[in-house]
DNA sequence: CAGAACATTATTGTATACTAGAAAATGGGG
DNA sequence: CCCCATTTTCTAGTATACAATAATGTTCTG
């Protein structure tokens, strides 16, 4: 085992947060987590510090660490930045893509379509993330890829609700097709424009998000301080 | 004292790194820092974990924590992302700026020019950072502002390289003037174009080249500090 | 019964002690 | 003199003990 327990705990907590097991606003109790992972509080605390630094959790001095509960305006801001990073990635990807890249992306997109047509929401959701991750990588800028992935993960609990809105999955699929075609044709502007629309939450999707947000906030803020 | 020692140590280390007191690749010894700050290793370790998470330091399991020493290609990638965030900020700022914002920005820019004309390089750097920070804030997106500031700080030790490559401070000053005028005129495209040129080290085609080079080389040489 | 002051409890923050693994030192053989 | 194996030492990682403070409960007073 080359990886440190504290690092594994940090990653485990990140995953449990983005997958929704640890809901928005939930208190991350040090003693409880120590027992859960079978270690002392020390590595748990270090994991929590890192989560807080990454923005996934929020640390209140002498009060505890909580899964980040961004306000609606903060959420809108984060999606605005996310859109910009996605546009940058697809812009660079369109310019720098190799044929192998495009083939791989086409394959992922087909798998995505299969999940969509089979009505497998969970699988579509996973494959959708894969497509986006591939585009990040195709940008040829690994720092951008890492930052985009980080923000993507952080927004994941909120994006999931967005995708569950009726009809959104099909729209999303269509947009993927357009983006893929634009990359293949080297049509940078079309790729960017479609991507921005794909990510941006304002407009009709804005209300979808708001309802989802309120839904989330209603459930798990029982022990969240204010 | 409402702020925790661990948080203050983290911020102190960040400042000492971006100001160059703790040089690139320097080992951050836990015992040494404990003595320096008059605390035990525990809060020091927590501070180091956070620095590593933010990217300013790099943590090697059972070997120690070091001030991040990014490779040249990683630096190019980070500057490429920085350029995009700056462009986004100036795009939003141009659309959303109030007259008071523009006045304040003009004032900062004049102070910057004074330092430039006085040949006060250190002060020019500081005021230059202020101008950029003001533009981040003017974007009206506080999340973007925070992320831009974070990356700006992280790149601060390397920004002198940028000036060396580009030549003289005067060019940078001219670009500031053009950007400010574009914001005042509401000329979004001009503001963006100038800003991208202002930030990017050698231009996008150079970045494309580096990207392609990394593809060829497999980007696997990640040598570690001594 | 309401509310405030006090005592109690629980949890975070820090210090110290201990463990383990990697770098450095040592020493023997070529 | 150099190379490699062994030992030693040093530092990072973790556990535990303790201190400090916020949250909670209780009791006394009006």
Image: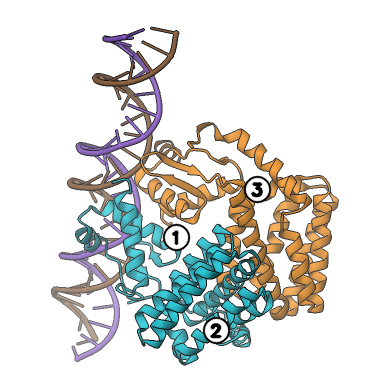
Chain colours: A orange, B cyan, C brown, D purple
Residue at x 55% of width, y 77% of height = B77
**Please, is residue A32 above or below residue B102 in the view?**
above
Q: x and y percent of residue B134 in the render?
A: 50, 67
State the residue in front, A3 or A183: A183
**Please, is residue A219 above or below residue B183 in the view?**
above
Q: Is mark 1 on a helix, strand or loop?
A: helix
Quarter of the image for residue A218 reads top right
Q: In this view, does B22 lie to the left or right of A162?
A: left
Q: x and y percent of residue B188 in the render?
A: 67, 74
Q: How crowded is mark 2: few (under 14 residues within 10 Å), some or many (20 or more)?
A: some
Which numbered disc covers residue B175?
A: 2
From the image, tell me which residue sits under label 1: B53
Residue at x 61% of width, y 50% of height = A73
Question: How far apart are the two marked residues, 2 and 3, measured between alpha carbons?
Answer: 39 Å
Q: What element carries label 2?
A: helix
Quarter of the image for residue B14 reads bottom left
CB within 8 Å, label 3 to label 1: no
Callout 1 and callout 2 share a chain: yes
Q: Is mark 3 on a helix, strand or loop?
A: helix
From the image, tell me which residue sits under label 3: A158
Residue B172 at least partly seen: yes
Q: In this view, does B8 lie to the left or right of A17?
A: left
Residue B195 at least partly seen: no
State the residue in front, A205 or B217: A205
């Amino acid at each position: 085992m080359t990886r440190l327990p504290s690092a594994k705990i940090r990653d485990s907590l990140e995953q449990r947060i983005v997958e929704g097991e640890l809901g928005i606003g939930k208190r991350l109790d040090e003693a409880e987590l120590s027992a859960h992972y079978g270690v002392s509080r020390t590595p748990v605390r270090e994991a929590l510090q890192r989560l807080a630094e990454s923005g996934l959790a929020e640390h209140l001095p002498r009060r505890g660490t909580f899964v980040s509960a961004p306000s609606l305006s903060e959420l809108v801001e984060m999606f605005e930045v996310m859109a910009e990073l996605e546009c940058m990635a697809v812009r660079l990807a369109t310019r720098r893509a190799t044929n192998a890249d495009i083939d791989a992306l086409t394959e992922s997109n087909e798998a995505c379509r299969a999940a969509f047509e089979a009505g497998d929401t969970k699988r579509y959701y996973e494959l959708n993330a894969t497509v986006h991750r591939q585009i990040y990588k195709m940008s040829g800028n690994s720092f951008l890829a890492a930052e985009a992935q980080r923000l993507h993960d952080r927004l994941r609990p909120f994006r999931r609700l967005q995708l569950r809105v009726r009809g959104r999955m099909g729209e999303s699929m269509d947009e993927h097709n357009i983006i893929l075609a634009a990359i293949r044709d080297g049509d940078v502007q079309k790729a960017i424009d479609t991507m921005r629309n794909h990510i941006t939450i304002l407009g009709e999707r804005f209300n979808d998000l708001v309802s989802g947000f309120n839904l989330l906030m209603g459930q798990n803020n029982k022990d969240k301080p204010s």
